[in-house]
Structure formats: C-alpha cells, structure tokens
Image: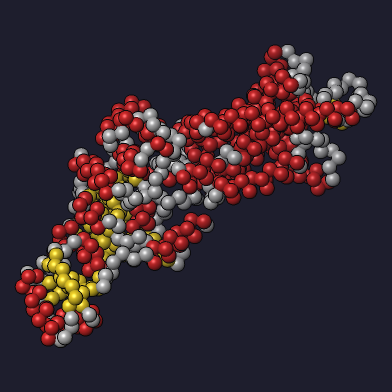
Amino acid sequence: MADRRFLTIYWRDMLRYVRFRALLFSSLVQPALWLAFFGIAISSSFDALGAQLPVVPGIPRIGYLTYMCAGVIAMTTLFTSLFGGMSLLFDKNWGLLREVMAAPMSRSNIVLGIGLSGITKSCIQAGIILVFGLLLGVKFFAGYDPLHTIIAIVGILVFVSIFALGFVFLSAAIAITMESPEGMQGVMTLLTMPIFFASNALYPTQAFPPALQAVSVVNPLTHLVTGIRYFAIGPEFSAIGQTFSYSVADIAISFGVLCLFAALTFVLALYRVRNARVT
Amino acid sequence: MADEVIRVAGLTHRFDELVAVDGVSFSVSAGEVFSFLGPNGAGKSTVINVLTTLLPMQDGEVVIAGRDLRTEPDHVREAIGIVFQEVTLDRDMTVAETLEFHGRLYGLPREERRTRIDELVALVELEAKHDTLIKYLSGGMKRRLEIARGLMTRPTVLFLDEPTIGLDPQTRARMWDYLRQVNREGTTIFLTTHYMDEADQLSNRIAIIDYGRIVAEGRPYELKNALGQDLIYLETADNARARAVLEGTPNVGAIHEKGGGLLVMVADDGTRVLPHMLDALRTENVAVTGINMKKPSMDDVFIHYTGRELRDERAENVATAVNRAGRH
C-alpha cells in the first residue's frame, strides 16, 4: 500500500526540476514561444478569413488566438507529462532507481510521487501560458466576475492535473523498461503526433473524416481541450466559422474520460514498476 | 545458532537456461565479515541481488536477521544496508540530500535523520562536502557516501557488492579501514569481491564461489594452510613431463599450471623438498629454467580450488543472460 513516502519521491523529482536551470527555463519559455510565434502568425491569417463569415446572433465570437490558447496549454501538458516518466529511465541507467527499488516501501509510492510531480510541473506551465496568453490578447475569462474567474482557473487546473496524471503514468510505464533516452524519445514522438493532431487542439474536429473523428473522440487530449475551453471561454462560442456548445453533461463526460484514462494508466504503470527488475 | 544473521540453504537462481547460482548454502554469524570470493560471472552478484531482494527468490531458503526472505521481503529490506556494485547516486543531488532521501525512503523520523546524517558524514570524513553536488566528488568519496548511506538505518547486516572496484590502491586501503570500523561497531558485513587481497585483509571467513557453487569455505589462514606449508613455482623446458616426474616425488601435493610454469604444493618444509624435486627432474633430463618459493596466498588458494586463474569467458555469458532476462 502507498503511504506518504510518495512525497519523498516527489520531493526528489522536484529537486531535479528546479536544479536543471536550462531545462526548467526552456520548459517554461517554450509554450510561451508557441503562443507568441505560431499563435500570432496563424491567428492573423485565420481571423482575416473568419471575419468574412456571418456572426451568429447571441453567441460570442472569439479570435483564433483565444481558440488555440487552450490547445497550447493542452499540448504543453501532453509533452511535459509524456516526458515525466523519463526520470525513471535516467535513474535506471545512471541513478537512483536501484536504491529506490530496494527500499522497504510499496512501489505505488514511486508511481504516485512521479505523478504528483507531473501535476506540479503541468500546473506551473499552464499558469505561465495563461498569464502570457492574457498579455498577448487571449480573451479568456471575458465578462467573468472574480469568483467565476477563480472557479474557471481551478477547473482548468483540475482538468490539466488529471490529464497530466494519465500521461505521466503512461510515460512511467514505458520508461521503466526502456534502454535509452533516444528510444524513449522515439516512442514519445510516435505517440505525440496522432494524439496532438487527431484532436481539437488547433482546429475543430467536426469536419474530420469518420476514422479520424473516432480517434479524436477517444483521444484524452480532445477532452482536456474541451474542458479548458468550457472553463476559459464559456459553454457556447463561435470560432473559425464554427459554433461550439458544451453542456454540463459533455464536460462531465470529458472529465470522466480523463479520470478513466488516468486510472487505467495508473494500473498499467504500477504493474510495470512492480515487475521491473533493476539489478 | 542464536547469533546467526544470514542463513542460506540450497539457493539456486537461473537466467533462462543459465544456472547462475547452483545450490549455494552458507551462514554468517553476527559481527562477522564474510566474503564471497570469485571471478567475474561466478554468481556473486546474483547471490547478493537475491539476498537484497533485487532479484526474486527462485529455489532455496534464505533467512536474514530472523526474517524469511520469501515471505517477509520488506522486513529483510528494513534490516539490511546495501552498497551496490555500480555507483547508485544522483549526480545532481548533494551529499546531505542523498542521505536525507535514503532516510525518508526508509521511514526514519526527521530528528533521527538529522543526527544520523551528521554522524555518518563524520564517519566517512565528508563533512566538508555536506552540501556539495555528487558530480563534484571523486570516485572514492562517492563510495564512502554510499557506505554512509548503507548505514543510515543502522542495519543488522551491510551488503557490499565489489566495494572497491575501480578505486586506486590508496583509496581501497582507506575503504577497508572504514569497513573495519563499521564492523567493530557491531555491523555484520557481507561482501563480494574478486580481489584476493580484499577478501584476505577484511574477512573473518571466505567462501570461494565458482560456476555458481561454493567450492571452499573457511577462515583465510585455514584456506591457506590447507594448501600445505610452502608453494614452489617451477618453470621447465617441458611442463607436462616435469609434472609427471614430480607427481611421484615424496611430500609433493597438488600441482597446478600457472602462467607458463607449474605451481607445486608441498606438505613439508619447502627448503627440504625442493632439492629432491630438482634431483628427480635432473635424473629425467627435464631442464629447469626458473624457481620461486613462497608461502601460499589467497591467489594460490583460489587456483587450488578452482583449477585456474581468473577467467572471463563465462563472465560474458552470464552478463548476456542477465541482460536478456532483464529485458523481458
């Protein structure tokens, strides 16, 4: 059974996070750069196209930068979490994993500790993107009163956290038997592509061909983006010529999918870490 | 035995087809320094990995500090300290953080962690490096830190797998001093080594392990005495004939090939046996090109019990099998 020693694993993982200054810096600046360069460049052309489309009365129209900001938060969480298990690989090859595995404690502590560290990193990044996005002109929380804004931020961070857990666990399950960081990098790239592009992060999925749409429906990233947009923009809005509307039930389902995904990957990671042999 | 800290009976461990440990039995008493001596690939690391719960138990029985390894692995873990063969440290943590991390993993209360870290850093003379990142430590300092870490929880028994591998002679001697001091303070020590001098210098008892089996066990002087009083090393023009001749000579014991010559164990004072040996060889026209006489060393003990010097081909086989098993 897990006990509070998962906090020890967490403490040590965060120690590394703040100690690698270059890595810390790039992980914080990179999503901001995405938003600044890709976001502004593409939104200026998309918004020019969208301006010709008729306005649906009663539904707020949002710019592309606001639309994609949710996608950038989700993407950053995905990347960060997928590499969250990497510390297991490094520890196995060059570090402390043998020491951790020989300790008289449940290995669920290892999985939980890494998961918590993944949540922390993702929430810090999401916060930075939110602040930076608002500075760049992202229209999040438009017309919200302070309480509503706080609830929205909490909602976003809860979604980000559950999603992060799912992918950190998946990452840990893969990393524990990987031999090299290069191999890990390869697998991560393979995973990232379909997850990122078969989602609603950058564009709506309504026009996808059926097969791709099916992927997007089960894709946890779609559900994270949906959640973020619901909390940050509202239940109904239009962007790039499409109308989006989310009911509370939709959001509950998205949340349920993320929870289910995290639960499954937790079981997988725990199984893999328990059965790992490090000698 | 009441003060028995480790009891191993019929321990067998396989990697796929390869039997790395084959029916090993031994026991270690409280306060002893017990060494497993053997070449690379003999099965030493496999034994220590099973005993420290890093590999699962297959066949046999192991009781450590009164706990059955098969049914109570967590209690065994609480009772032991481990110094792994390879450096098992995070380069980007400090000395103090490394010990703190270990203390927390083993559930030591905060106050105890603090006092213990201070004591141990002093023991291994790393006070000045308390807040230094491990990447700035020398190989010897890292080893000392690992020993300190192994002692954090005041283990009943400290396991060390090849504790001085890759260290220079001076640092090795220092390391032995630390280990002796740790042992004097009451910790039982189990170590594996492929260095004869290390086993000889440190141990109360030695088990020589080869091809996964214990081929000899005893106190260092007992093992050496078993070889006879003296060892005579001969280089001759024809070692095969010389061997045949010497086997018929009185007071000559076992004969082994070593280097380019023969190692002859004699049951009597070597200075008196040697003239007879030379006479016999001269009579048979075997030219002797070199002679040396000495007291038996652990090196010779090893050759006597295994029939050869350190060899490597099996080591590679085991390493491959272990890697393969690890990838499953």
**Residue A267 shows in the view:** no
Judged left or right of residue A102, residue B26 is: left
Q: Is residue B110 above or below residue B8?
A: above
Q: Is residue A222 above or below residue B277?
A: above
Judged left or right of residue B106, residue A35 is: right
Q: Is residue B286 above or below residue B326?
A: below
Tell me where residue B35 sits by quadrant: bottom left
Instruction: Give B59 or B261, whichever is nearer the viewer.
Output: B261
Judged left or right of residue B304, residue B313 is: right
Judged left or right of residue A142, residue A167 is: left
Tell me where residue B209 sits by quadrant: bottom left
Across the whole image, how many numbered discs are drawn on residues? 0
Instruction: Give A2 or A109, whichever is nearer the viewer.
Output: A109
Residue under the image location 86 percent in, 40 percent down: A207
Query: Residue A7: x, y in percent?
Result: 48, 31
Residue under the image location 46 percent in, 45 percent down: A94
Query: Residue B64: x, y in percent?
Result: 30, 49
Residue under the image location 83 percent in, 46 percent down: A210
Q: How is the image coloured?
A: secondary structure
Farthest top residue in view: A145
Tell me where residue A72 sits by quadrant: top right
Instruction: Give A279 or A136, whichever is nearer the viewer.
Output: A136
Query: Residue B117: x, y in percent?
Result: 32, 31
Instruction: Give A174 or A36, whichever is nearer the viewer.
Output: A36
**Residue B237 shows in the view:** yes
Residue under the image location 48 percent in, 47 percent down: A93
Q: Is residue B132 above or below residue B282?
A: above
Query: Residue B139: x, y in percent?
Result: 35, 43
